[in-house]
Amino acid sequence: MLQAKLTENETFVLEEVKIPEPNEHQVLLKVELCGICGSDLHTYHGKHPFVFPPLVMGHEFSGVIAKLGKGTEDKFQAGQRVAVEPSIVCGTCYNCRNGRYNICNELSVVGCLTDGAYTEYIAVSSEKIIVLHDELSFEDGAMLEPLSVGVHAVEQGHVKEGDKILVIGAGTIGLLLAQAAKAAGAEVAITDVIAYRLDLAKELGIPCTINSKTEVLEERLQQFSPEGVDVIFECVGSSYTIRKAIEIARKGIRIVILGVVDSEVLLPVSLIQDRELELVGDLMFTRKDFVKAQELILSGKVNVRSLQTKTYPLRQVKEAFEYILNNKDSALKVFLDPKQA
Ligand SMILES: [Zn+2]
Ligand SMILES: [Zn+2]
């Protein structure tokens, strides 16, 4: 089978390797589609703080069960259409025992710390599989992972019905999070510097879109919510936007940091102290977020299809990355398809 391995920064090698055998409690999937995540771009450039080549990336994928490992025959059947939670956890550490396995002490992630789905076949733990509803396409299935990130963030932000929230960054995660927050009853403002993405946010039903390149963010926010917003979500990961979030926050609110920060950032900690701000980290999701993500797509409360930009054959992985890098404004979710020659 074909797999695309990042062997060093900005270098993919296409390799022919043996199809893996599923171990006990694993199933073998024929990969249908795999999304390219923003974090894969960080890894590609050697700028991810925790993920490095050599690696087969790919953690947002859907597929069909091709073979059942021992102990999975009673739960699954060959041919079932599925998506996969990419986390690999110990199950015994403090957070695993307390329902927060997304921050397991031994956390590993398929496609980040072990080889992932930029490949034709992958063996995964049967416990991490979610069977796709008939109405969901493989594209939808591959979008469950990033949408689950947004669903989990809404919970990390303690978003309540009627809250007014600000999402900084209208990339894939920002747009999915904004919709998940809206589905939870929040009124959402979203800001970015790219008009294309803000136009899309409008189409997706986000009422307040702010282009902070051409508009004064503080003024627009003042109109949106005169007493300030209740929660801020930072989905960019730059020192500028994190600092901005702190500066514009109403006293006493939560700021949830989702963006991958690729260098150390100097922050006005005195403001965090003085204004009783809560800066909260956010990583991945757990099963319930994944289940919820599927429900949100099915109910039509979250539109993932408008975020799907383009699909490349797996063999053209390099072109796919170049396309994203050359079309930073309009490229949202780009998929790799291992079935295409
Ligand atoms: Zn991702
Ligand atoms: Zn654990």
Image (cartoon, rainbow, N blue to C red):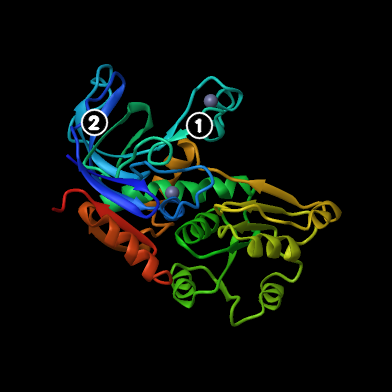
Residue depicted at x 38% and y 63%: 307
Q: As drawn, is 294 to the left or to the right of 97?
A: left
User: What's under tag 2, amino acid-wise?
Assistant: Leu
Residue located farthest toward the left when viewing the structure as drawn: 341
Q: Considering only vertical position in the picture, is 56 above or below 23? A: below
Q: Secondary structure at mark 1?
A: loop
Say which quarter of the image contains residue 96.
top right
Q: Considering only vertical position in the picture, is 175 above or below 118? A: below
User: What's under tag 1, amino acid-wise?
Assistant: Leu
**Is residue 218 visible in this depiction of the protein?**
yes
Q: Considering only vertical position in the picture, is 286 above or below 70? A: below
Instruction: Identify the residue position indicated by label 1 in the image.
Output: 107
Residue 27: mark: none
Rate crowding at label 1 as few (under 14), some (14 to 19) or many (20 or more) other CA atoms within 10 Å: some
Residue depicted at x 42% and y 69%: 328
Badge 1 residue CB within 8 Å of ligand 2: yes
Say which quarter of the image contains residue 250.
bottom right
Instruction: Identify the residue position indicated by label 2 in the image.
Output: 28
| Disc on the earlier residue, 2 or 1 | 2
Q: Considering only vertical position in the picture, is 238 above or below 1? A: below
Residue 309: give x, y in percent of width and height: 32, 65
Residue 336: give x, y in percent of width and height: 27, 53
Residue depicted at x 44% and y 59%: 172
Say which quarter of the image contains residue 311.
bottom left
Q: As drawn, is 178 to the left or to the right of 72?
A: right
